[in-house]
Structure formats: C-alpha cells, structure tokens
C-alpha cells in the first residue's frame, strides 16, 4: 500500500515541470503517423516532451523484437504499444507497472467497456490503458470500380469469388494484399468467421479444440481461403498493408480485407471512408465483430520523475477528448464507454453500433491475427502454417488442417 500512496501522491503533487516519455509503437504509415501527431501535440500542449520510438512494420513484429533487446539491456522505454497476449506475457515476466492504483484513484473502471477491462487485466490488475478499438473483419471496396463494372458488393465468400472472377476478367486486381504473414492471417481470420461462423471460430482459436481444427469445417475454410490466392496483385511480394490500401484508393485493386487502420490511411489521402471507399463487414461476418484493442503499457521505473511522466501520459490517454481526436484519425473507435461519436465518419459510426450490438449478443470475438486470441508463440505457429499454405498452390487443405493443429498443440 506504501507504493500505492506514493505513486498517487507523486502524480498529484510533484512540482510542475516538463515530463518526458519515450514511447515505442509501430504507427508509421501516413494515417498512423497523423494519429501519433495528435497524441504528441496533446502531450506537448501540457508542456511535456515526447521521445518517439517508432519502429516500422505493420503487425508490430519488428517493434516487439526491438523492445525485447531494450528490455534485455535493462533499458526499456517508459511506455510501449503492447496489446492482447503480448501485454500479458510482458506482465507475467514482471516488466510492467501495475496501473490499478491509478485506475482506482481516478475512477477509470466504470469508464471501460467490459471487453476492454478484461483484455487489459491480469489477475485483477490493470496492466495498460486503452487507446482505441479496431475492428478487424472489414471489407473495403472502391465504389467507382464497382459502379463502373456494374457489380454488387459481396455479402458472402461465394459471392466474393464470383465478383473477383469478373474483376479479373476485366484486368482489375480483385484483392489488395501483400505476402506478409500477418496480412495473410487477417484474410484467413475473416474467411474463418464468414465460412465457419462464430462457434467454429471460438472452438478453433479460443478453445483450440483438436477435432474442430482438423474437422471438415476447417478443411472447407482452408479450401475457400486457398481460392483467394488467385486474386492478389501482381506485385504481391513485399506489398505493405498501406501500399495495398493505396492500390485500392487508386482503383488499381477493387477490394481489401483488413482492419480499420485502413481508414486512417484513406483520410490521410483525402479519400472519404464510407463514400469513395465503402466499408462493409467482411463476407459472411455480418453481426460479428472481431476486435483488436490497442493499448499502451508502462514499464516499471524507479525514478519518481519517470513514474510521474507515465502517470500523466496514462491520464491523457484516458481523456474522452484524446480518445475522440486520436481515434478519428487512427480509424478505430474510442475504448471508453459512451463516447461522443458525432464527429466520426460513417464507418466509425457503423463500427460503434456493431460493437454495441455484438457486445449485447455475445458476438465480440478476439482477433487471432492481431494477437488477441492465442499466446504469441501459437499465433506465430498459426501464421507460419497459413502463409506457407497460401503461397503454395499445390498445398493440400486436409494436410494443412493437421499441420495447423500440430503447430497449435506444440505451442500450447
Ligand atoms: C495495430 C494497429 C496498427 C496496425 C497496422 C495493428 O497490429 O494494432 O494499431 O495500425 O497493426 O500497423
């Protein structure tokens, strides 16, 4: 309890002077960098200094590698974008500051939706503050391309394939995607939701049920997933997610399946989400909401000035104003209860409405591709199997289901 009173008193009573924080993140695309600017400028408005520790690479793999080497050198940054299982893994190793005293003192708990509170808690302790809720199961489509070709947006995967074949006949790339394993995992996840459904998804990835992982539904999902390989861009190797979005914007590709960080990219390029680029639930996943909760965790520190700076940053992140401004640019929705959505675009409003509905109906599903559903090692194993499969036209779905189950079992 001594620590509790120290940190809270320290937070409230240290003399006013510039606080400094170093924050690790991988928000480096055009839209993401604009979102970080919102945070930096609100932090600077308070007279504080921001030391940016940005590591390129969607999905955060490189950022996590760099973070590990800093932590091993006993020099972690004050704060880092850590989420889902990764957050819990760092927490179990004892690296993270327990934010429960602040949460209790400042009355944060009632402001957190149950999913947010659960995702960020470890053995009852709050291990991070949320910055926004991304939805992963989205289909983005270029409206002009669809209108020009007289095509209707697909609402299931069979329709997707039919539409994609027509686009391909016209020389238009149907699906904007690159060959990075995490992008492939996002696509697979949406196929699993749309073809397999909620119960299948839960059994396969949350319960890791062997019979489901090797059963006929998984084989069907993998077969459909494999079909989609025919629709990728010519320059698929090395294409980053935001470059894929740029292809979609320019009409060089007709569709993209990706989380709503895509929206940040659209606005950065002056494309109107929900108008120039339509946002729809990914095929067959209407009513479901696979979430990716972004959050910032604080690494344990001894220096009172660093503790103070962390406290101030956490408080800033928890303000409705920050959550509104940041998420409008980032493409996500605020991670606090009852946000004011009046200034958000159509896709964010739809996301929020779908979130509430999914919350009520038990349809909120943690994203496997985004590290919300399985431990990091297991996710890595899943991604390896999926990307080998997707990139090998001769690979066999039955055998791949067995590989997937084995990869998951060996990392359990
Ligand atoms: C993060 C998002 C980010 C996306 C692409 C995801 O893992 O949660 O905040 O925009 O990767 O970089």
Image: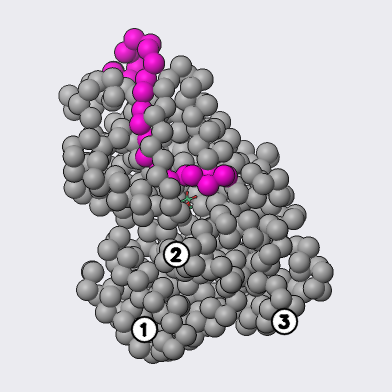
Q: Is residue 178 above or below residue 16?
A: below
The residue most toward the top is: 15
Q: Where 165 falls versus 233 (above or below)?
A: below
Mark 2 within 8 Å of ligand 1, using the beta carbon: no
**Lower sequence index among marks 1 and 2:** 2
Residues shaded magenta: 8-32
Q: Earlier in the sequence, mark 3 or mark 2?
A: 3
Q: Which mark is residue 169?
A: 3
Q: Nearer the viewer, residue 52 or 45?
A: 52
Q: Are marks 3 and 2 in contact (CB under 8 Å)?
A: no
The Cα–Cα distance between marks 1 and 2, rounded to whole angstroms, is 20 Å
Does residue 350 appear left or right of residue 75 in this picture? right
Closer to us: 356 or 176: 176
Pointer 1: residues within 10 angstroms few (<14), some, or many (20+)?
many
The numbered dot on residue 401 is 1
User: Is residue 12 or residue 180 the one in the foreground?
Assistant: 180
Between marks 1 and 3 in the image, the one whose residue lies nearer the viewer: 3
Count of labels shown? 3
Query: Looking at the rendered structure, which numbered label has been put on residue 180?
Result: 2
| Mark 3 element type | helix
Residue 76 x, y percent position in the rendering: 26, 37
Q: Position of residue 66 (x, y in %)?
A: 30, 46
Residue located 42% across and 59% down the image: 370
Residue 109 location (% of width, % of height): 40, 38
The yes-or-no answer for disc 1 within 8 Å of ligand 1 is: no
The residue located at (62%, 38%) in the rendering is 340
| Mark closer to the observer (1, 2) | 2
* Tag 1 and tag 3, C-beta contact below 8 Å: no
Marks 3 and 2, how far apart at CA: 26 Å
């Amino acid at each position: 309890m001594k620590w509790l009173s120290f940190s809270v008193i320290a937070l409230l009573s240290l003399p006013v002077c510039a606080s400094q924080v170093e924050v690790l993140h991988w928000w480096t695309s055009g839209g993401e960098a604009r979102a970080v600017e919102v945070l930096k400028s609100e932090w600077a408005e308070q007279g504080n200094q921001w030391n940016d520790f940005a590591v390129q690479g969607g999905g955060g793999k490189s950022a996590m590698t760099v973070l590990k080497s800093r932590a091993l050198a006993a020099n972690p940054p004050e704060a880092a974008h850590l989420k889902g299982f990764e957050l819990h893994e760092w927490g179990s190793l004892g690296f993270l500051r327990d934010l429960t005293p602040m949460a209790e003192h400042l009355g944060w708990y009632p402001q957190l939706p149950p999913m947010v509170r659960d995702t960020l808690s470890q053995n009852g302790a709050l291990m991070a503050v949320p910055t926004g809720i991304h939805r992963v199961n989205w289909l983005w489509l270029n409206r002009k391309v669809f209108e020009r070709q007289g095509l209707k947006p697909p609402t299931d995967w069979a329709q997707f394939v039919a539409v994609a074949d027509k686009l391909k006949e016209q020389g238009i790339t149907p699906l904007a995607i690159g060959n990075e394993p995490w992008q492939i995992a996002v696509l697979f996840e949406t196929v699993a939701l749309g073809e397999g459904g909620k119960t299948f998804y839960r059994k396969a990835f949350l319960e890791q049920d062997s019979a489901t992982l090797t059963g006929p539904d998984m084989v069907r999902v993998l077969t459909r997933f494999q079909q989609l390989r025919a629709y990728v861009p010519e320059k698929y190797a090395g294409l980053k997610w935001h470059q894929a979005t740029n292809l979609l914007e320019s009409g060089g590709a007709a569709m993209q399946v990706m989380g709503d960080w895509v929206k940040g990219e659209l606005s950065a390029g002056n494309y109107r989400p929900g108008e120039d680029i339509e946002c729809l639930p990914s095929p067959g996943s209407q009513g479901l909401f696979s979430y990716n909760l972004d959050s910032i965790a604080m690494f344990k520190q001894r220096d009172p000035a660093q503790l103070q700076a962390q406290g101030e940053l956490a408080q800033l992140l928890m303000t409705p104003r920050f959550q509104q401004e940041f998420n409008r640019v980032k493409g996500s929705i605020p991670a606090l209860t009852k946000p004011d959505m009046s200034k958000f675009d159509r896709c964010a409003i739809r996301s929020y409405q779908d979130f509430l509905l999914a919350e009520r109906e038990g349809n909120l599903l943690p994203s496997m591709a985004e590290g919300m559903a399985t431990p990091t090692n297991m996710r890595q194993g899943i991604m390896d199997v999926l990307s080998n499969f997707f990139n090998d036209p001769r690979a066999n779905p039955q055998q791949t289901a067995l590989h997937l189950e084995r990869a998951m079992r060996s990392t359990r």
